[in-house]
Image (cartoon, rainbow, N blue to C red):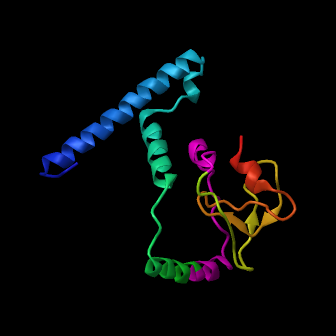
Amino acid sequence: MRTKKWTVRVFAQLLDMACCNGRIEYQRLCEQSATPKQQRLDLLTFKMDIAIALIKAETAPRSKRLREAEVDSDEEEAQASATKRGKVTALPPDDVRYNMTGHFPEHQKLGSHNRCGNPGCSGKSRVKCLKCGIFLCLQNRNCVMDFHTR
């Protein structure tokens, strides 16, 4: 990190040290539970999972101006995606998926529907989880509840 402010450097070092200590604890738990080494996370993947979990944990409400700009950009994306195939959405990490906060279903426009992201369901849905960004069935089956509980 390139900065001259010592407080920023110290804070970055403390965050890095906390991540490394967390990984050491993770390795101890993996050894106790006899997890094979191929299934253990390396340091970079471990830090990325922490970052994703912190980003998706809880955010402050956005201002009205930002939400209006998002609606405009969402309309443009919907028009562009009508002719192209969408990307495959990756499942969120388990700690974000099962934390039971902020998972609200949102109905999408008529033109946008996608396959249900719940494993074992092959239906199509227009309902998307706001936090996870995954389409889930809500009409015939309650995949929203099934997806977010263990």
Residue 111: quadrant of the picture:
bottom right
Using residue 9 as the reference point, say whether residue 64 is left or right of it. right
- Quarter containing the C terminus: top right
Q: Nearer the viewer, residue 142 or 1?
A: 142
Name the residue rendered at 81%, 48% in the picture. 120
Q: Nearer the viewer, residue 77 or 118?
A: 118
Q: At which x and y percent is residue 53? A: 50, 47
Q: At which x and y percent is residue 77? A: 58, 78
Q: Is residue 88 magenta?
A: yes
Q: Is residue 86 magenta?
A: yes
Name the residue rendered at 79%, 61% in the picture. 137
In the image, which residues are magenta?
75-100
Q: Nearer the viewer, residue 96 or 113?
A: 96
Name the residue rendered at 87%, 62% in the picture. 140
Q: Nearer the viewer, residue 24 or 11?
A: 11
Q: At which x and y percent is residue 33? A: 60, 18
Report whether residue 118 is seen. no
Residue 106: quadrant of the picture:
bottom right
Name the residue rendered at 31%, 40% in the picture. 15
